[in-house]
Image: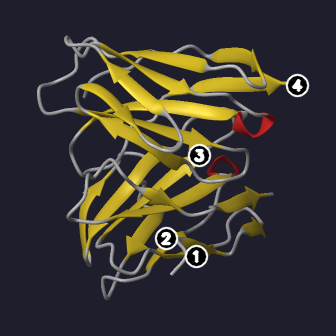
Amino acid sequence: LAKTTQPISMDSYEGQEVNITCSHNNIATNDYITWYQQFPSQGPRFIIQGYKTKVTNEVASLFIPADRKSSTLSLPRVSLSDTAVYYCLVGERADGLTFGKGTHLIIQP
Amino acid sequence: DTGVSQNPRHKITKRGQNVTFRCDPISEHNRLYWYRQTLGQGPEFLTYFQNEAQLEKSRLLSDRFSAERPKGSFSTLEIQRTEQGDSAMYLCASSAETGSPYEQYFGPGTRLTVT
């Protein structure tokens, strides 16, 4: 299972773009990169998933360089409600997700 | 169907008692997962069902824990002889067999407090 490393915490302000980078040097050929968001006292929510290059949906963009050893979750024009923990996961098997401690993102007014 | 539901949302029990939690997954999802989350940590995988078959169990799932999914729909997680260390949020998630196993949909969780 590929180990992931992401910052423990980040701060930003409303209206800014926030980029959270995750390192996964041991990513395997079949692994996908998946990001989840979690608010206090709620279950995690799937945000986005990608394999290579760039993926965009209505919530975020995911940038993956050619070597796939890292990825960047980009949140455009954040608001206070984006304050949450963001988890980067790498893998493809159906036998349960491995979450780390995630990145605590705090958005200030 | 609006998502994964879990009951109860909160449970307070005394040490040594048995507790049972229920999870109702998204109806067309045949994969169901249980996780446990303690304060400040990410969720930890406990067990995984595909339909009614329990295919994977974590080492965290001691013999006091048992999970079932008898008809391949809802699932129950029972903890026998609860201990204070069992206090945590218990999360259930489901995913579709046709989709990515990493695209899971989580319920709101059951918060267990063992006194």
Numbered label attached to residue B37? 3
Which residue is depicted at the point 52% across and 71% down? B3
B18 w.r.t. B93: above or below:
below
Amino acid type of the residue tagged 1 in the rendering: Thr
Q: Type of residue at label 3?
A: Gln
Q: Are marks 3 and 4 on the same chain?
A: no
Q: Nearer the viewer, residue A46 or A96?
A: A46
Residue contact between numbered discs 3 and 4, judged by CB atoms under 8 Å: no
The mark that comes first in sequence, 2 or 1, is 1
Q: Are marks 4 and 2 on the same chain?
A: no
**B84 vs A47, nearest the viewer:** A47
Q: Residue at x 51, y 24 (%)?
A: A74
Q: Residue furthest bottom?
A: B71
Q: Are marks 4 and 1 in contact (CB under 8 Å)?
A: no
Foreground tag (4 vs 1): 4
- Are marks 3 and 1 in one subunit? yes
Q: CA distance from mark 3 to mark 1?
A: 17 Å
Q: Chain of mark 1?
A: B
Q: Check chain identity for marks 2 and 3: say if they share one.
A: yes
What amino acid is labelled 2 in the image?
Leu
Q: Callout 4: helix, strand or loop?
A: loop
Measure the alpha-carbon separation of dots 2 and 3. 15 Å
| Residue that label 4 marks | A109
On whether disc 4 and disc 1 are found on a single subunit, the reply is no
- The kind of secondary structure element at disc 3 is strand
Q: Which residue is mark 2?
A: B77
Question: Mark 4 packing: few (<14 Cα in 10 Å), some, or many (20+)?
Answer: few
Front in this rendered view, residue A44 or A56: A56
Q: Which residue is mark 1?
A: B20
Task: Pick the residue in front: B37 or B14.
Answer: B37
Q: CA distance from mark 4 to mark 1?
A: 42 Å
Q: Nearer the viewer, mark 4 or mark 2?
A: 4
